[in-house]
Image (spheres, helix red, strand yellow):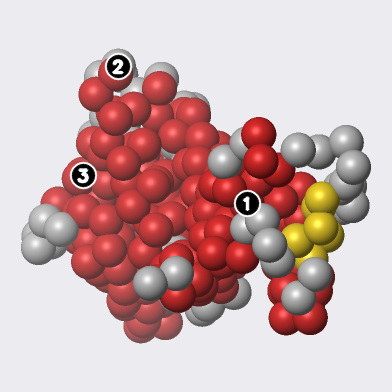
Amino acid sequence: MTWIFSVLGAALVAVALRDIYATLWHPHGLGTLSRGVFRGIWWVAGRIRRHGRALGSAGPLGMIAAVLLWAALIVTGWALIYLPHMPGGFSFASALQPQSSSDAVASLYLSLVTVATLGYGDITPVYPVLRLLLPVQALIGFVLFTAAISWILQIYPALIRRRAAARTVHLLISTDSTEVARRGEASIACALLDGLTEALTTVEFDLRQYGETYFFRDANSDRSLAAMLGHAPSLVRAGEASTAMEVRRAAVRLEQQLGSLTSYLDSRYLHTGGSIEQICAAYAADHRHRTTPR
């Protein structure tokens, strides 16, 4: 029956590696476990303080919790693999007394120091297969460490691009650019609408690749896409009211991109089944922002 421990341990390691791959490198964003971690923290934070201050920490806490979960699965999985072979399959340093501690504790200790690539050498494998497994676990530990670092390097540029898009919408609305789109020179109006379309396209692709960015709340409304996105339809309507055909076409492009972005937000996070305006309102409410689209 000892093989059950090894199979269960291998399954835990496989689940952790699959979730790391899905979260960091798969083109469709979060893995199942990390998505559950972020959703759980977001739900709890949203109920601690209604005005959203706690939500500001949900994203970073979600990343920490996800990495700790991956580490716990990997450490526990390898400990289960080692457990059936304790203590006979390993050689203990003279200072250690394996008979005075449980096999489970020794397995967990060996797994921890191996995944952390510390390699104290006080417990060494005797069987050839185990001698191969320990370096494999050390490599996985290195993958976990580099994954955590690369995750941070990946998502913060995406967050900056999202904030830049929100700021763009804020500047357009605050300078009454709807009138430019409605009655201004065609080339300027087209550039205005197409620039926003490009920004929102980038935001959508970032969100699809880095789904965890949804759970990062920006407190300042002028830098929060959740607060600003509801203003974008007014620019669409202004462009559609223009007498210039090219401006109307630019407004249609913006509307299509806005529809694509809000559709993805709704299908993945909000689940309202509503119109663009309703999805934008739900997005703002989920991030604890109040917005009155113009």
* Residue at the spot of label 3: 281
Question: Looking at the image, do the residues carrying marks 1 and 3 touch, with CB atoms under 8 Å apart?
Answer: no
Residue type for callout 3: Ala
Decide if residue 79 is on the left or right side of residue 58: right
Tell me which numbered mark, 1 or 2, is placed earlier along the sequence: 2
Decide if residue 139 is on the left or right side of residue 280: right
Q: Residue at x 34, y 27 (%)?
A: 45
Position of residue 123 measured from the top left corner of the image (x, y, whole percent)? 81, 52
How far is disc 1 from disc 2 in space, using C-alphas?
42 Å
Decide if residue 55 is on the left or right side of residue 92: left
Residue type for callout 2: Arg
How far is disc 3 from disc 2 in space, using C-alphas?
20 Å
Q: Residue at x 66, y 34 (%)?
A: 100
- Quadrant of residue 184 within the rendered picture: bottom left
Q: Residue at x 53, y 77 (%)?
A: 26
Q: Residue furthest left?
A: 273
